[in-house]
């Protein structure tokens, strides 16, 4: 078979789309986490190359707002990957335990959310898989209440998201 050239954005979009549909269909959450994590790794770099703000950088600014200290990007990304269980499913060091504990539903939702934020930053939210996941989160996370909480934030916090 001949080699084919692929754009990294297209590869990440396919990984993310597959992760979203697997998630929404209630299928293999571990694959969702792995696919969304891989897509996120690509998308973060593409967002940075486009001169835009990736999910991780926005999170770093929120952390600074709450603690007064802005974490380094690499350390923050590593922490997010650990909290979202992304690294638990792609790395296994010799001294790691043979089992892991995680809420696979929450970890899958978090991993997709992270990747989708960066995808939307680059491409918008008009593709069916983005709309479907955003609808899911609006319904399951009580969208109107989330927006009310966001609107209650000080303007300086809302401005952390650069456009």
Image (spheres, rainbow, N blue to C red):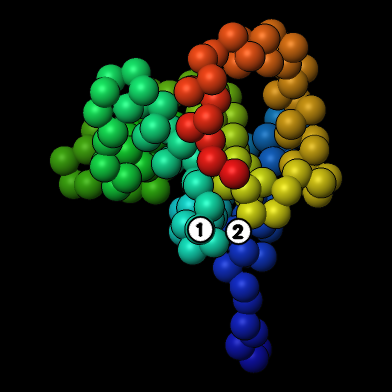
| Front: mark 2 or 1 | 1
**Residue 30 picture location, percent across and down:** 53, 38
Residue at 81% of width from left, 49% of height from top?
A: 127
First along the sequence among labels 2 and 1: 2
Q: Nearer the viewer, residue 27 or 65?
A: 65
Does the rendering let one see residue 33?
no
Q: Report whether 67 appears left or right of 137.
A: left
* Residue drawn where x is 49% and y is 63% of the image: 49
* 90 relative to 145 in the view: left or right: left
- Which mark identifies residue 16? none
Q: Which residue is mark 1?
A: 51
Placement of 161 over or under 41, stated as above or below: above
Q: Nearer the viewer, residue 148 or 93?
A: 148
Q: Does residue 12 lie above or below 59 as drawn?
A: below
Residue drawn 26% across the image and 42% down it: 72
Q: CA distance from mark 2 to mark 1?
A: 18 Å
Of residues 159 and 72, which is closer to you in this image?
159
Q: Quarter of the image holding residue 26?
A: top right
The residue sitting at 36% across, 23% down in the picture is 65
Image spot of residue 107 (x, y percent): 51, 29
- Please tell me how crowded label 2 is: few (under 14), some (14-19), or many (20+) other residues with Cα within 10 Å: many
SS class, disc 2 = helix
* Residue lying furthest bottom: 2
Residues at circles 2 and 1 in contact by the CB criterion of under 8 Å = no
Q: Quadrant of the C terminus?
A: top right
The secondary structure type at the circle numbered 1 is: loop
Q: Identify the residue position indicated by label 2 in the image.
A: 12
In what quadrant of the picture does the N terminus appear?
bottom right
- Residue 118's x, y, as percent? 57, 47
Q: Is residue 72 left or right of residue 24?
A: left
């Amino acid at each position: 078979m001949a080699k084919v050239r692929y754009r990294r954005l297209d590869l990440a979009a396919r990984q993310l789309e597959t992760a979203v549909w697997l998630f929404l269909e209630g299928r293999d959450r571990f694959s969702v986490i792995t696919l969304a994590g891989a897509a996120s790794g690509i998308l973060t770099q593409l967002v940075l190359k486009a001169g835009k703000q990736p999910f991780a950088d926005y999170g770093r600014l929120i952390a600074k707002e709450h603690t007064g200290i802005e974490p380094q990007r690499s350390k923050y990304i590593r922490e997010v990957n650990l909290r979202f269980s992304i690294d638990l499913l792609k790395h296994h060091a010799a001294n790691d335990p043979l089992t892991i504990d995680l809420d696979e539903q929450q970890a899958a939702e978090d991993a997709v959310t992270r990747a989708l934020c960066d995808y939307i930053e680059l491409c918008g939210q008009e593709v069916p898989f983005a709309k479907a996941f955003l609808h899911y989160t609006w319904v399951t996370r009580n969208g109107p209440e989330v927006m009310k909480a966001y609107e209650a934030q000080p303007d300086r916090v809302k401005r952390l998201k650069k456009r």
